[in-house]
Amino acid sequence: MKSKYTIATLGSHSALQILRGGKDEGFKTIVVCKKEHCQIYRYFRVADKVLEIHSYDEFPTVEDELLKENAILVPHASLIAYMSLDAVGKIRVPYYGNRRILLWESDRDRQRKWLEKAGLNLPRVYEDPDEIDGLCIVKFQGAKGGQGYFLARSSEEFRQKIGALKDYSIQEYVVGIPVYIHYFYSVIRGELELMGFDRRYESNVDAISRIPAGLQEGIDVTYTIVGNFPLFLRESLLPEVFKMGQRVVEASREVCEPGIFGPFCLETVVTPDLKFYVFEISARIVAGTNVFMEGSPYAYLKHGIPMTTGRRIALEIREAIEQGRLKEILG
Ligand code: AMP
Ligand code: AMP
């Protein structure tokens, strides 16, 4: 039955993991990618078919082919970063996940409402730059991977650095260590799973400590994501991790029926008093899950095989097909 269906995704971000996971669960796979990225998917032999496009705007031109192959499209950040929300809304190929939750993820006021409803600790937000009274981080809209973010200590410093840029948000900078929590909510099994944790490797902020403090002056830090590291969390923190994930799922049902399902990530900073501050939610697979291409310790404990988030998505789709419940996981 499952061999009738194909797992498809865009070629970037976590496509290797998603496609390989599809194959591991017995699906055919298709990658849609820009010419310059195709070689990667051929080299790693994760895609049965590679559909080339010149730009992401051309995605609609391959939709008929995807429909013919009974494809189920698995979204990730590149889809959201390179296609507008409107274009994603118009995709005709069956889409894994709740597409409408992206409206809650992409709008920072809505996202905050959702996370507040879930009762999480959030960094303070400065609505007005004149309110800045401590270290803050200035961010820009969209899944742009930290590019251009900067720090400021006062409204004067903010004004000097922001220039003519618009569409920013100013958050209290929480001093602690970043922990990205990978969750998977299974509709078919009715259970929240913990898939793993990562931390990021960002240029140039992760380079600054390599320069003696006295020589750091004049170097502006920013947060462009380059890669990720795996992380194993102190075990006594796990109950809180599960509680936070569960509350996010419950609150999502109130804000956007039927709520969030499949993979999602809470992006947190943990302070020395072991409090998690959630500064963002990603409502789909995050690339940090790529560090567990052979499965994370937690996914191994749960499934007994090296289960990646990509494979977990395919397993969910397989079980949905086998139980005649596919509609419940498409949105
Ligand atoms: P890309 O297709 O690599 O240009 O990535 C598209 C978007 O996905 C970027 O703008 C980032 O926001 C996000 N992204 C890509 N790779 C990573 C990563 N390793 N960790 C976190 N976010 C990422
Ligand atoms: P983001 O693109 O929102 O995932 O954030 C990119 C980087 O900024 C990550 O390294 C985070 O650790 C850092 N960051 C974002 N928000 C905060 C915050 N409120 N306090 C401290 N660090 C933050």
Image: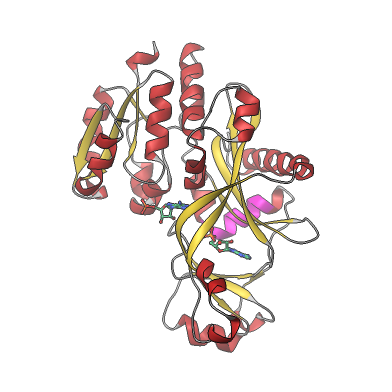
Q: From the viewer's perspective, is 244 left or right of 262?
A: right
Q: From the viewer's perspective, is 318 left or right of 68?
A: right
Which region shows up in magenta? 107-115
Q: Quadrant of the N terminus?
A: top left
- In the rendered image, residue 118, in percent from the top left (x then y), is placed at 71, 47
Q: Is residue 300 magenta?
A: no
Closer to the camera in the image, 200 or 190: 200
Residue 173 can be seen, yes or no: yes
- Residue at 53% over, 44% down: 283
- In the rendered image, residue 193, in percent from the top left (x then y), is placed at 64, 32
The answer to whether residue 288 is above or below residue 188 is below
Closer to the camera in the image, 80 or 114: 80
The answer to whether residue 82 is above or below residue 254 is below
Closer to the camera in the image, 90 or 143: 143
Residue 284 can be seen, yes or no: no
Location of residue 254 by image quarter: top right
- In the rendered image, residue 18, in percent from the top left (x then y), is placed at 41, 34
- Residue at 57% over, 38% down: 260
- Residue at 46% over, 18% down: 318
Q: From the viewer's perspective, is 287 left or right of 94?
A: right
